[in-house]
Amino acid sequence: MQNEQLILGFETSCDETAIALMKGDNLLINKISSQVEIHEKFGGVVPEVASRAHAEMIRNLFHSSINECGIDIGEIDIVTSTDGPGLSGSLVVGYNFAKSVAWALQKPFYAVDHMVGHLSAPLIEHPNMDPPFLSLLVSGGHTQIVFVEEWGKYNLLGSTIDDAAGEAFDKLSRFCGFGFPGGPAIQKISEGGDPDKVKLPRPKTSNKFDYSFSGLKTAAVYFLQGLTEDDKLLKKDFAASYQEAIVDSLMNIYEKAVTETGVTNLSGGGGVMANTRLREKIQTFAEKNDKNLYLPSPKLSTDNAAMICVAAKNDLTTNEMNIEDIRLSSVIS
Ligand code: KG4
Ligand code: ZN
């Protein structure tokens, strides 16, 4: 794969309709149409509503992306899209749209795993990030520690045995009526709050690198239910304590994995990596331990299509795949 090829990418695995165009290392466009306002009143993503919203949005978003870039559609060299994991009704909209564009242009199509997208996202701003590295992937559906020995060799050291970190934010936020999505809502409320005010557990599991968050959420709910009229608790102190418990749990286990593997390159991604407190903690840890840290900026941590473009580019480059091979194995099948 030549480095300067123009890649068109789609990402519709959950509630963001996202399109990006990348040429070489340059991100020409990275558009995200969020459905937050649509799902807000339900307190969570409604899958059927999400897939309909993707279907209504994707065509216009595609045309406006092409127009804003000022490119001729025929210049696109390759089309890529997330093929999972995610909400099936949502995935199918972006995936089929992308395949149709590829077919219409008679250009190759390449599918990308959503988590490989998050794992590759730092490359957009740090094209020099090289394996081996240890990635902390934290999203609404996944919490994983992945040891990337070399590109394509992804060794899952640990993951959550129940809720994902993002889910822990979202579920408590829904219970408390803090807002949707829960992570950014709790982060905002936490500002100026005392993270040590409420003692909450940092759950452990039998596998040293696995996570568990459902007990923390239950402990927080019991704590709130146990409050009496006379108890004085500031909302921001409670939110800050809950956020701190999630961030501490994430970092305690990740730090152990860094120590045991002895890696010098640290990385991460997924929506929860947009969290300011988590970013502060991982940065302090990296600085204290003389490690290199490669994080996507907050906007590229949450779902986007640029990460799908860069993952496709990286995959194709490292596997030295020829575009004509992909054409035969993908679009036509
Ligand atoms: O990666 P992502 O955008 O979508 C999935 O693949 O799930 O992650 C979404 C998750 C949600 O749970 C959301 O509450 C959380 O990321 N999130 C955050 C922040 N921004 C998004 N969690 C904590 N702090 C944030 N600033
Ligand atoms: Zn995601």
Image (tube, grey):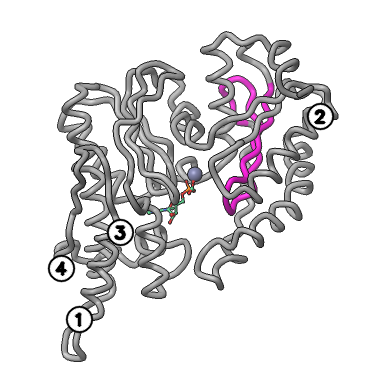
Q: Which residue is mark 3?
A: 214
- Horizontal side of 22 relative to 226 (left or right) equals right
Front: mark 2 or 3: 3
- Horizontal side of 193 relative to 39 (left or right) equals left
Quarter of the figure that contains the C terminus:
top right
Which comes before the other along the chain, label 2 or label 3? 2
Mark 3, ligand 1, within 8 Å: the answer is no
| Residue placed furthest toward the front | 206
- Magenta stretch secondary structure, dominant: strand
Instruction: Measuring from the top left, give residue 53's x and y in whole percent.
Output: 70, 57
Mark 1, ligand 1, within 8 Å: the answer is no
State the SS at label 2: helix
Is residue 310 in the magenta section? no
> Residue 236's image quarter?
bottom left
Q: Which residue is mark 1?
A: 226
* Residue segment shown in magenta: 6-27
Q: Residue 217 or 315: which is nearer the viewer? A: 217
